[in-house]
Image (spheres, rainbow, N blue to C red):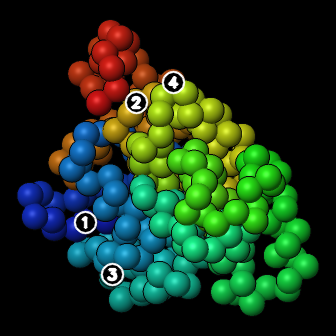
Amino acid sequence: MIDIRVKKALRDFTLDVDIHMGECGTLVLLGENGAGKSTVLNLVAGLMTPDTGEIRIGNETFIDTSVRTCIPAESRGIGYVFQDYALFPHLTVHDNIAYGMRARHLPGDITADRVRDLAGRLGLREVLQQPAGTISGGQSQRVALARALAVKPKILLLDEPFSALDVQTRVLMRRELREVLSFEGIPAILVTHDIRDAFEIGCCIGLMERGKMVMYGEQRTVFQKGLHPFIDQFFSGAPSL
């Protein structure tokens, strides 16, 4: 169970969201650039602090401003795939994936087994010993995903993970992400302005405008023609925003 109820004054508006993820495995936050979607991720990750509110993941309270509870970012056990992937280009693919596990001083055999497992499922075995700076965009996205999953996080956050990929690679990566999240059983929040990501990945959809959640619910409920102009563009054949 994931509960996010926060307010945060930003430059152009105040972010004010109330999110409850019960049995929903993957929430996609959808909306145009500047709607506050990435701010939600940063608040969950502990990279920003809300003015008021609370964030709970399972039985753990990450922040509750009413009692001044705030777990630091490094202690939250969260996986984060940034928009630019944030790989270490001079390290091998193997060492990038293993980075978080080594930082936690996990045994070498456990780390090696976990890296091999993720590399196999994400099609990275042939590039494990290559420097991360020499691989393709699609491979870089897979490495960033594998690194975030390697530590078995409580929740996975993804900020526009497909924005730098070509159309064909996006289609492939959506399917791979959906499959690996299902296999790992890890809840996720994905931010995007591409409605196709939401349609193909999201169990629950949150449509945001200027810091507010204007629509929220299960995918089949949100994706009904006529409910919102942003949604209607998908059914009218308009290109992704």
Q: Which residue is mark 3?
A: 65
Dot 1 amino acid type: Lys
Q: Nearer the viewer, mark 4 or mark 2?
A: 2
Dot 4 amino acid type: Arg
Which numbered circle lies on residue 220?
4
Instruction: State the residue lying farthest toward the top.
Output: 236
Which numbered circle lies on residue 7?
1
Do the residues bearing badges 3 and 4 touch, measured as CB atoms within 8 Å?
no
Cα distance between the residues tagged 1 and 2: 25 Å
Q: Residue at x 42, y 87 (%)?
A: 69
Nearer to me, 66 or 146:
146
Q: Nearer the viewer, mark 1 or mark 2?
A: 2
Cα distance between the residues tagged 4 and 2: 14 Å
Q: Which residue is mark 2?
A: 195
Residue 150 appears in the rendering? no
Dot 3 amino acid type: Thr
Cα distance between the residues tagged 1 and 4: 28 Å
Q: Earlier in the sequence, mark 2 or mark 3?
A: 3
